[in-house]
Image: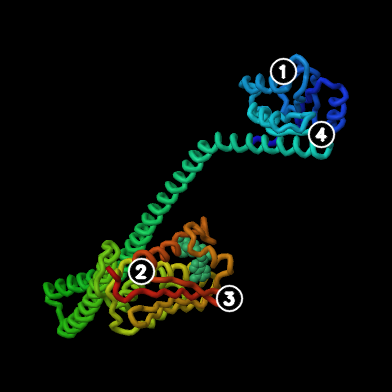
Amino acid sequence: MTPSTPRKPKLLVVDDQAFNIQILYQIFKGDYEVFMATSGAQALTLCADQSPDLILLDVVMPDMDGHEVCRRLKADPHARDIPVIFVTGHNNSEEESLGLQLGAVDFISKPVNATVVRARVHSQLMLRETLRQVQELNETLEQRVAQRTAELERALENLKQSQDNLANSEAKATLSTLFASVSHELGTPLGNSKMVASAMAEQTLSMAQDMENGQLKRSALSAFMEQLNDGLALLQRNLERAVELLGDFRQVAADQASEQRRVFDLKLVVQEILHTLSPSLKHKPHQIVVEIADELMMDSQPGPLGQIVINLVNNAYLHAFEGRSNGVLTISARIDGDQVQMCVADNGVGMSPEVKEKLFEPFFSTKIGKGGTGLGMAIVRNLVTKTLGGRISVVSKVGEGTRVDIVLPRVLPG
Ligand SMILES: Nc1ncnc2c1ncn2[C@@H]1O[C@H](COP(=O)(O)OP(=O)(O)OP(=O)(O)O)[C@@H](O)[C@H]1O
Ligand SMILES: [Mg+2]
Protein backbone atom coordinates (compact mmCIF):
# COMPACT_ATOMS: atom_id res chain seq x y z
CA MET A 1 0.00 0.00 0.00
CA THR A 2 1.28 3.46 -0.80
CA PRO A 3 1.70 5.72 2.22
CA SER A 4 -1.13 8.23 2.55
CA THR A 5 -0.25 11.50 0.88
CA PRO A 6 0.27 14.44 3.21
CA ARG A 7 -1.65 16.83 0.93
CA LYS A 8 -5.01 18.20 2.04
CA PRO A 9 -8.03 16.66 0.31
CA LYS A 10 -9.52 18.76 -2.47
CA LEU A 11 -13.11 19.88 -2.08
CA LEU A 12 -15.18 21.44 -4.85
CA VAL A 13 -18.08 23.58 -3.62
CA VAL A 14 -20.71 24.46 -6.23
CA ASP A 15 -23.47 26.99 -5.53
CA ASP A 16 -24.82 29.95 -7.46
CA GLN A 17 -25.19 31.95 -4.23
CA ALA A 18 -21.89 33.54 -3.12
CA PHE A 19 -23.18 33.66 0.43
CA ASN A 20 -23.62 29.86 0.61
CA ILE A 21 -20.20 29.30 -0.87
CA GLN A 22 -18.70 31.59 1.74
CA ILE A 23 -20.24 29.61 4.57
CA LEU A 24 -18.94 26.30 3.23
CA TYR A 25 -15.55 27.84 2.53
CA GLN A 26 -15.27 28.97 6.16
CA ILE A 27 -16.18 25.53 7.41
CA PHE A 28 -13.64 23.64 5.27
CA LYS A 29 -10.75 25.97 4.61
CA GLY A 30 -8.74 24.70 7.56
CA ASP A 31 -8.60 21.03 6.61
CA TYR A 32 -9.27 21.06 2.88
CA GLU A 33 -8.13 22.73 -0.27
CA VAL A 34 -11.41 24.34 -1.30
CA PHE A 35 -12.31 25.18 -4.93
CA MET A 36 -15.43 27.16 -5.67
CA ALA A 37 -17.74 27.26 -8.69
CA THR A 38 -20.84 29.41 -9.07
CA SER A 39 -22.33 27.60 -12.07
CA GLY A 40 -22.69 24.06 -13.39
CA ALA A 41 -20.43 24.77 -16.38
CA GLN A 42 -17.72 26.21 -14.15
CA ALA A 43 -18.03 23.19 -11.88
CA LEU A 44 -17.39 20.78 -14.78
CA THR A 45 -14.32 22.74 -15.91
CA LEU A 46 -12.86 22.92 -12.40
CA CYS A 47 -13.55 19.27 -11.91
CA ALA A 48 -11.62 18.37 -15.06
CA ASP A 49 -8.73 20.65 -14.02
CA GLN A 50 -8.45 19.81 -10.35
CA SER A 51 -9.83 16.25 -9.90
CA PRO A 52 -11.35 17.04 -6.50
CA ASP A 53 -11.75 14.32 -3.90
CA LEU A 54 -15.35 15.29 -3.20
CA ILE A 55 -18.00 17.68 -4.59
CA LEU A 56 -20.62 19.57 -2.57
CA LEU A 57 -23.22 20.35 -5.19
CA ASP A 58 -26.15 22.74 -4.98
CA VAL A 59 -29.27 21.41 -6.70
CA VAL A 60 -31.09 24.55 -7.81
CA MET A 61 -28.98 26.65 -10.13
CA PRO A 62 -29.82 28.60 -13.33
CA ASP A 63 -28.73 27.23 -16.74
CA MET A 64 -27.43 23.86 -15.60
CA ASP A 65 -28.84 22.54 -12.34
CA GLY A 66 -27.07 20.22 -9.90
CA HIS A 67 -28.80 17.12 -11.26
CA GLU A 68 -27.52 17.79 -14.75
CA VAL A 69 -24.02 18.45 -13.45
CA CYS A 70 -24.16 15.16 -11.60
CA ARG A 71 -25.45 13.31 -14.69
CA ARG A 72 -22.55 14.64 -16.75
CA LEU A 73 -20.01 13.84 -14.11
CA LYS A 74 -21.22 10.25 -13.88
CA ALA A 75 -20.99 9.95 -17.67
CA ASP A 76 -17.34 11.01 -17.63
CA PRO A 77 -14.99 8.08 -16.89
CA HIS A 78 -12.45 10.45 -15.29
CA ALA A 79 -14.98 12.01 -12.92
CA ARG A 80 -17.53 9.30 -12.26
CA ASP A 81 -15.83 8.04 -9.11
CA ILE A 82 -15.73 11.41 -7.38
CA PRO A 83 -18.33 11.32 -4.60
CA VAL A 84 -21.03 13.94 -4.88
CA ILE A 85 -23.01 15.27 -1.91
CA PHE A 86 -26.06 17.33 -2.82
CA VAL A 87 -26.71 20.44 -0.80
CA THR A 88 -30.38 21.05 -1.10
CA GLY A 89 -32.73 23.78 0.05
CA HIS A 90 -35.83 21.63 0.25
CA ASN A 91 -36.48 18.66 2.37
CA ASN A 92 -37.92 16.86 -0.60
CA SER A 93 -37.75 13.08 -0.76
CA GLU A 94 -38.50 12.94 -4.49
CA GLU A 95 -35.57 15.16 -5.16
CA GLU A 96 -33.42 13.04 -2.88
CA SER A 97 -34.33 9.84 -4.64
CA LEU A 98 -33.60 11.39 -8.03
CA GLY A 99 -30.23 12.50 -6.68
CA LEU A 100 -29.49 9.01 -5.43
CA GLN A 101 -30.41 7.53 -8.78
CA LEU A 102 -27.98 9.93 -10.37
CA GLY A 103 -25.22 8.55 -8.18
CA ALA A 104 -25.00 11.02 -5.27
CA VAL A 105 -23.67 9.54 -2.03
CA ASP A 106 -25.42 11.82 0.47
CA PHE A 107 -27.65 14.85 1.06
CA ILE A 108 -27.26 17.87 3.25
CA SER A 109 -30.05 20.36 3.83
CA LYS A 110 -29.59 24.09 3.92
CA PRO A 111 -29.04 25.95 6.11
CA VAL A 112 -25.98 23.78 6.73
CA ASN A 113 -24.86 22.84 10.20
CA ALA A 114 -21.05 23.02 10.35
CA THR A 115 -20.58 19.91 12.49
CA VAL A 116 -22.93 17.80 10.38
CA VAL A 117 -21.48 18.83 7.06
CA ARG A 118 -17.94 18.33 8.27
CA ALA A 119 -18.74 14.87 9.61
CA ARG A 120 -20.51 13.76 6.42
CA VAL A 121 -17.74 14.98 4.15
CA HIS A 122 -15.16 13.38 6.35
CA SER A 123 -16.92 10.04 6.45
CA GLN A 124 -17.36 9.99 2.66
CA LEU A 125 -13.69 10.70 2.16
CA MET A 126 -12.74 8.00 4.64
CA LEU A 127 -14.99 5.58 2.80
CA ARG A 128 -13.43 6.50 -0.52
CA GLU A 129 -9.91 6.15 0.84
CA THR A 130 -10.73 2.76 2.33
CA LEU A 131 -12.22 1.65 -0.98
CA ARG A 132 -9.13 2.82 -2.79
CA GLN A 133 -6.92 0.84 -0.40
CA VAL A 134 -9.03 -2.27 -0.81
CA GLN A 135 -8.82 -1.94 -4.57
CA GLU A 136 -5.08 -1.49 -4.39
CA LEU A 137 -4.85 -4.47 -2.08
CA ASN A 138 -6.85 -6.55 -4.52
CA GLU A 139 -4.60 -5.54 -7.36
CA THR A 140 -1.47 -6.46 -5.46
CA LEU A 141 -2.97 -9.55 -3.86
CA GLU A 142 -2.31 -11.83 -6.77
CA GLN A 143 1.23 -10.60 -7.00
CA ARG A 144 1.72 -11.04 -3.26
CA VAL A 145 0.30 -14.54 -3.32
CA ALA A 146 2.68 -15.42 -6.15
CA GLN A 147 5.59 -13.91 -4.24
CA ARG A 148 4.65 -15.74 -1.05
CA THR A 149 4.26 -19.01 -2.93
CA ALA A 150 7.69 -18.57 -4.42
CA GLU A 151 9.11 -17.89 -0.94
CA LEU A 152 7.42 -21.00 0.43
CA GLU A 153 8.70 -23.07 -2.47
CA ARG A 154 12.22 -21.82 -1.79
CA ALA A 155 11.86 -22.66 1.91
CA LEU A 156 10.64 -26.14 1.01
CA GLU A 157 13.57 -26.62 -1.34
CA ASN A 158 15.96 -25.54 1.45
CA LEU A 159 14.29 -27.95 3.82
CA LYS A 160 14.68 -30.82 1.38
CA GLN A 161 18.29 -29.84 0.85
CA SER A 162 18.99 -29.88 4.60
CA GLN A 163 17.26 -33.22 4.90
CA ASP A 164 19.52 -34.60 2.18
CA ASN A 165 22.51 -33.03 3.92
CA LEU A 166 21.41 -34.62 7.14
CA ALA A 167 21.11 -38.07 5.61
CA ASN A 168 24.42 -37.59 3.80
CA SER A 169 26.32 -36.49 6.85
CA GLU A 170 24.79 -39.33 8.87
CA ALA A 171 26.15 -41.84 6.40
CA LYS A 172 29.51 -40.07 6.09
CA ALA A 173 30.00 -39.76 9.83
CA THR A 174 29.33 -43.44 10.36
CA LEU A 175 31.51 -44.53 7.45
CA SER A 176 34.48 -42.39 8.41
CA THR A 177 34.24 -43.55 12.03
CA LEU A 178 34.23 -47.12 10.80
CA PHE A 179 37.20 -46.66 8.46
CA ALA A 180 39.24 -44.89 11.10
CA SER A 181 38.37 -47.52 13.67
CA VAL A 182 39.05 -50.53 11.47
CA SER A 183 42.44 -49.35 10.29
CA HIS A 184 43.52 -48.12 13.68
CA GLU A 185 42.32 -51.01 15.75
CA LEU A 186 43.52 -53.74 13.42
CA GLY A 187 46.89 -52.02 13.26
CA THR A 188 47.88 -53.19 16.74
CA PRO A 189 47.33 -56.97 16.53
CA LEU A 190 48.54 -57.16 12.94
CA GLY A 191 51.65 -55.09 13.76
CA ASN A 192 52.36 -57.35 16.76
CA SER A 193 51.92 -60.44 14.63
CA LYS A 194 54.29 -59.12 12.00
CA MET A 195 56.94 -58.40 14.66
CA VAL A 196 56.61 -61.84 16.21
CA ALA A 197 56.70 -63.50 12.80
CA SER A 198 59.87 -61.71 11.73
CA ALA A 199 61.59 -62.39 15.09
CA MET A 200 60.75 -66.07 14.70
CA ALA A 201 62.00 -66.07 11.13
CA GLU A 202 65.34 -64.59 12.28
CA GLN A 203 65.73 -67.16 15.03
CA THR A 204 64.81 -70.00 12.68
CA LEU A 205 67.43 -68.76 10.21
CA SER A 206 70.17 -68.68 12.87
CA MET A 207 69.14 -72.13 14.11
CA ALA A 208 69.33 -73.45 10.55
CA GLN A 209 72.88 -71.99 10.18
CA ASP A 210 74.01 -73.54 13.50
CA MET A 211 72.59 -76.86 12.36
CA GLU A 212 74.47 -76.68 9.02
CA ASN A 213 77.72 -75.80 10.80
CA GLY A 214 77.18 -78.66 13.24
CA GLN A 215 77.14 -76.17 16.11
CA LEU A 216 73.64 -76.90 17.27
CA LYS A 217 73.56 -77.59 21.02
CA ARG A 218 70.74 -79.35 22.73
CA SER A 219 70.29 -76.54 25.23
CA ALA A 220 70.02 -73.99 22.37
CA LEU A 221 67.46 -76.17 20.63
CA SER A 222 65.22 -76.39 23.67
CA ALA A 223 65.56 -72.61 24.22
CA PHE A 224 64.59 -72.09 20.59
CA MET A 225 61.61 -74.39 20.95
CA GLU A 226 60.47 -72.42 23.97
CA GLN A 227 60.78 -69.10 22.15
CA LEU A 228 58.96 -70.57 19.19
CA ASN A 229 56.12 -71.67 21.47
CA ASP A 230 55.84 -68.25 23.09
CA GLY A 231 56.02 -66.61 19.70
CA LEU A 232 53.32 -68.85 18.26
CA ALA A 233 51.08 -68.22 21.28
CA LEU A 234 51.58 -64.48 20.86
CA LEU A 235 50.90 -64.75 17.16
CA GLN A 236 47.77 -66.74 17.77
CA ARG A 237 46.47 -64.29 20.38
CA ASN A 238 47.03 -61.32 18.11
CA LEU A 239 45.49 -62.96 15.10
CA GLU A 240 42.49 -64.08 17.14
CA ARG A 241 42.11 -60.50 18.34
CA ALA A 242 42.23 -59.26 14.74
CA VAL A 243 39.60 -61.80 13.69
CA GLU A 244 37.43 -60.88 16.66
CA LEU A 245 37.73 -57.19 15.81
CA LEU A 246 36.92 -57.83 12.19
CA GLY A 247 33.85 -59.74 13.33
CA ASP A 248 32.67 -56.79 15.41
CA PHE A 249 33.36 -54.36 12.62
CA ARG A 250 31.66 -56.56 10.09
CA GLN A 251 28.55 -56.68 12.29
CA VAL A 252 28.57 -52.94 12.90
CA ALA A 253 29.21 -52.25 9.23
CA ALA A 254 26.42 -54.61 8.20
CA ASP A 255 24.06 -52.98 10.69
CA GLN A 256 25.00 -49.54 9.46
CA ALA A 257 24.84 -50.39 5.79
CA SER A 258 21.44 -52.03 5.99
CA GLU A 259 18.42 -50.58 7.62
CA GLN A 260 17.40 -54.09 8.41
CA ARG A 261 15.73 -55.03 11.59
CA ARG A 262 16.85 -58.11 13.41
CA VAL A 263 16.66 -59.61 16.83
CA PHE A 264 19.74 -58.50 18.74
CA ASP A 265 21.24 -58.36 22.18
CA LEU A 266 21.32 -54.68 23.20
CA LYS A 267 24.37 -54.99 25.42
CA LEU A 268 26.39 -56.72 22.68
CA VAL A 269 25.45 -54.08 20.11
CA VAL A 270 26.44 -51.28 22.49
CA GLN A 271 29.74 -53.02 23.23
CA GLU A 272 30.47 -53.54 19.56
CA ILE A 273 29.87 -49.86 18.95
CA LEU A 274 32.13 -48.84 21.84
CA HIS A 275 34.72 -51.15 20.40
CA THR A 276 34.66 -49.37 17.06
CA LEU A 277 35.01 -46.07 18.90
CA SER A 278 37.80 -47.20 21.22
CA PRO A 279 40.74 -46.04 19.04
CA SER A 280 39.67 -42.44 19.37
CA LEU A 281 38.61 -42.73 23.01
CA LYS A 282 41.27 -44.82 24.70
CA HIS A 283 43.95 -42.15 24.98
CA LYS A 284 41.49 -40.00 26.96
CA PRO A 285 41.34 -40.42 30.74
CA HIS A 286 37.58 -40.94 30.89
CA GLN A 287 35.55 -43.98 31.60
CA ILE A 288 32.52 -45.53 29.97
CA VAL A 289 30.30 -47.72 32.15
CA VAL A 290 27.76 -50.02 30.51
CA GLU A 291 24.90 -51.06 32.76
CA ILE A 292 22.74 -53.24 30.57
CA ALA A 293 21.47 -56.66 31.56
CA ASP A 294 22.78 -59.64 29.60
CA GLU A 295 20.40 -60.92 26.99
CA LEU A 296 18.21 -57.86 26.86
CA MET A 297 16.84 -58.73 23.44
CA MET A 298 15.31 -56.23 21.04
CA ASP A 299 13.71 -56.69 17.64
CA SER A 300 14.57 -53.43 15.97
CA GLN A 301 17.23 -51.75 13.83
CA PRO A 302 20.68 -51.99 15.46
CA GLY A 303 22.30 -49.73 12.82
CA PRO A 304 20.47 -46.53 13.78
CA LEU A 305 20.75 -47.48 17.45
CA GLY A 306 24.53 -47.64 17.01
CA GLN A 307 24.58 -44.22 15.36
CA ILE A 308 22.69 -42.79 18.30
CA VAL A 309 25.22 -44.20 20.76
CA ILE A 310 28.14 -42.96 18.62
CA ASN A 311 26.77 -39.42 18.53
CA LEU A 312 26.02 -39.34 22.27
CA VAL A 313 29.45 -40.72 23.19
CA ASN A 314 31.15 -38.26 20.85
CA ASN A 315 29.20 -35.39 22.42
CA ALA A 316 30.19 -36.44 25.94
CA TYR A 317 33.86 -36.58 24.99
CA LEU A 318 33.84 -33.45 22.83
CA HIS A 319 31.60 -31.19 24.92
CA ALA A 320 30.82 -32.60 28.37
CA PHE A 321 34.37 -33.67 29.29
CA GLU A 322 36.16 -30.75 27.70
CA GLY A 323 38.99 -29.69 29.99
CA ARG A 324 38.27 -32.50 32.46
CA SER A 325 40.06 -35.68 33.37
CA ASN A 326 37.51 -37.59 35.41
CA GLY A 327 34.64 -37.99 32.98
CA VAL A 328 32.28 -40.88 33.51
CA LEU A 329 29.71 -41.75 30.87
CA THR A 330 27.10 -44.27 31.92
CA ILE A 331 25.07 -46.09 29.31
CA SER A 332 22.24 -47.99 30.95
CA ALA A 333 19.10 -49.70 29.76
CA ARG A 334 16.24 -51.62 31.26
CA ILE A 335 13.05 -53.19 30.08
CA ASP A 336 9.79 -51.50 31.01
CA GLY A 337 6.84 -53.46 29.64
CA ASP A 338 6.94 -53.29 25.84
CA GLN A 339 9.59 -50.63 25.97
CA VAL A 340 13.28 -50.27 26.57
CA GLN A 341 14.35 -47.29 28.66
CA MET A 342 17.85 -46.22 27.72
CA CYS A 343 19.79 -43.58 29.52
CA VAL A 344 23.08 -42.01 28.49
CA ALA A 345 24.37 -39.80 31.31
CA ASP A 346 27.60 -37.89 31.73
CA ASN A 347 29.06 -36.09 34.74
CA GLY A 348 30.40 -33.29 32.53
CA VAL A 349 29.94 -29.55 32.16
CA GLY A 350 26.21 -29.64 31.42
CA MET A 351 24.30 -27.18 29.27
CA SER A 352 22.89 -23.70 29.79
CA PRO A 353 19.12 -23.39 29.22
CA GLU A 354 19.88 -21.53 25.94
CA VAL A 355 22.03 -24.35 24.59
CA LYS A 356 19.60 -26.99 25.79
CA GLU A 357 16.73 -25.26 24.02
CA LYS A 358 18.55 -25.33 20.68
CA LEU A 359 20.16 -28.73 21.18
CA PHE A 360 18.13 -30.55 18.53
CA GLU A 361 18.21 -27.77 15.95
CA PRO A 362 20.12 -28.73 12.83
CA PHE A 363 23.38 -26.78 12.52
CA PHE A 364 23.29 -25.56 16.10
CA SER A 365 26.72 -26.12 17.60
CA THR A 366 28.89 -24.30 20.11
CA LYS A 367 31.87 -25.73 18.23
CA ILE A 368 31.20 -24.45 14.72
CA GLY A 369 34.58 -24.22 13.00
CA LYS A 370 36.13 -26.36 15.72
CA GLY A 371 34.95 -29.76 14.58
CA GLY A 372 31.22 -29.43 15.21
CA THR A 373 28.63 -29.30 12.46
CA GLY A 374 25.65 -29.16 14.79
CA LEU A 375 24.00 -32.14 13.13
CA GLY A 376 24.69 -34.77 15.78
CA MET A 377 21.66 -34.29 17.99
CA ALA A 378 19.36 -33.47 15.06
CA ILE A 379 20.32 -36.85 13.64
CA VAL A 380 19.84 -38.53 17.03
CA ARG A 381 16.35 -37.16 17.40
CA ASN A 382 15.46 -38.15 13.84
CA LEU A 383 16.68 -41.69 14.37
CA VAL A 384 14.95 -42.08 17.75
CA THR A 385 11.59 -40.70 16.70
CA LYS A 386 11.35 -41.47 12.98
CA THR A 387 13.40 -44.60 12.49
CA LEU A 388 13.01 -46.37 15.81
CA GLY A 389 9.59 -45.04 16.80
CA GLY A 390 10.70 -43.79 20.21
CA ARG A 391 10.93 -40.65 22.33
CA ILE A 392 13.88 -38.64 23.55
CA SER A 393 14.30 -36.09 26.31
CA VAL A 394 17.24 -34.34 27.90
CA VAL A 395 17.93 -33.18 31.42
CA SER A 396 20.94 -30.94 31.85
CA LYS A 397 22.27 -28.25 34.13
CA VAL A 398 25.46 -26.29 33.99
CA GLY A 399 28.01 -28.05 36.19
CA GLU A 400 25.77 -31.04 36.79
CA GLY A 401 26.18 -33.06 33.64
CA THR A 402 23.70 -34.17 31.04
CA ARG A 403 21.30 -37.07 30.90
CA VAL A 404 19.67 -38.20 27.67
CA ASP A 405 16.65 -40.45 28.14
CA ILE A 406 15.50 -42.54 25.23
CA VAL A 407 12.42 -44.74 25.27
CA LEU A 408 12.19 -47.26 22.42
CA PRO A 409 9.66 -49.93 21.56
CA ARG A 410 11.34 -53.28 22.26
CA VAL A 411 9.76 -54.65 19.10
CA LEU A 412 9.70 -52.13 16.27
CA PRO A 413 6.13 -51.97 14.95
CA GLY A 414 5.42 -52.64 11.28
N1 LIG B 1 26.73 -34.06 26.58
C1 LIG B 1 26.79 -32.75 26.36
N2 LIG B 1 27.26 -31.91 27.30
C2 LIG B 1 27.32 -30.57 27.07
N3 LIG B 1 26.95 -29.98 25.92
C3 LIG B 1 26.48 -30.76 24.94
C4 LIG B 1 26.37 -32.17 25.09
N4 LIG B 1 25.86 -32.67 23.93
C5 LIG B 1 25.65 -31.63 23.12
N5 LIG B 1 26.02 -30.47 23.70
C6 LIG B 1 25.88 -29.12 23.13
O1 LIG B 1 24.91 -29.16 22.12
C7 LIG B 1 25.45 -28.69 20.88
C8 LIG B 1 24.82 -29.44 19.73
O2 LIG B 1 25.22 -30.80 19.75
P1 LIG B 1 25.31 -31.61 18.39
O3 LIG B 1 25.75 -32.98 18.65
O4 LIG B 1 24.00 -31.45 17.67
O5 LIG B 1 26.37 -30.79 17.56
P2 LIG B 1 27.97 -30.81 17.70
O6 LIG B 1 28.40 -31.90 18.59
O7 LIG B 1 28.41 -29.44 18.06
O8 LIG B 1 28.42 -31.13 16.21
P3 LIG B 1 28.35 -32.57 15.48
O9 LIG B 1 27.71 -33.53 16.40
O10 LIG B 1 27.50 -32.32 14.25
O11 LIG B 1 29.74 -32.88 15.16
C9 LIG B 1 26.93 -28.87 21.00
O12 LIG B 1 27.64 -27.97 20.19
C10 LIG B 1 27.16 -28.62 22.50
O13 LIG B 1 27.25 -27.25 22.77
MG1 LIG C 1 27.74 -33.84 18.39
Mark 3 Cβ and ligand 1 under 8 Å apart: no
Q: Nearer the viewer, mark 1 or mark 3?
A: 1
Q: Which residue is mark 4?
A: 31
Q: Please state which amino acid type lies under the numbered disc 4.
A: Asp
Q: Nearer the viewer, mark 1 or mark 4?
A: 1
Find numbered disc 2 in the image and state the secondary structure of the residue it sits on. loop
Residue positioned 50% across, 39% down in the render: 147
Q: Nearer the viewer, mark 2 or mark 1?
A: 1
- Residue toward you, 378 or 321: 378
Q: Are marks 2 and 1 in contact (CB under 8 Å)?
A: no
Distance (Cα) linking label 1 and label 4:
23 Å
Q: Which residue is mark 3?
A: 399
Q: Quadrant of the N terminus?
A: top right
Q: Is residue 191 visible?
A: no
Q: Which mark sits nearer the N-terminus, 2 or 1?
A: 1
Q: Is residue 15 above or below residue 330?
A: above
Q: Are marks 1 and 4 in contact (CB under 8 Å)?
A: no
Distance (Cα) linking label 2 and label 1:
78 Å
- Residue toward you, 256 or 91: 91
Q: Which residue is mark 1?
A: 44
Q: Please state which amino acid type lies under the numbered disc 1.
A: Leu
Residue 24 placement, left or right of 193: right
- Tag on residue 389? 2
- Residue toward you, 108 or 306: 108
Q: Which mark sits nearer the N-terminus, 4 or 3?
A: 4
- Tag on residue 301? none
Find numbered disc 4 in the image and state the secondary structure of the residue it sits on. loop
Find numbered disc 3 in the image and state the secondary structure of the residue it sits on. loop
Q: Position of residue 244 (x, y in %)?
A: 25, 74
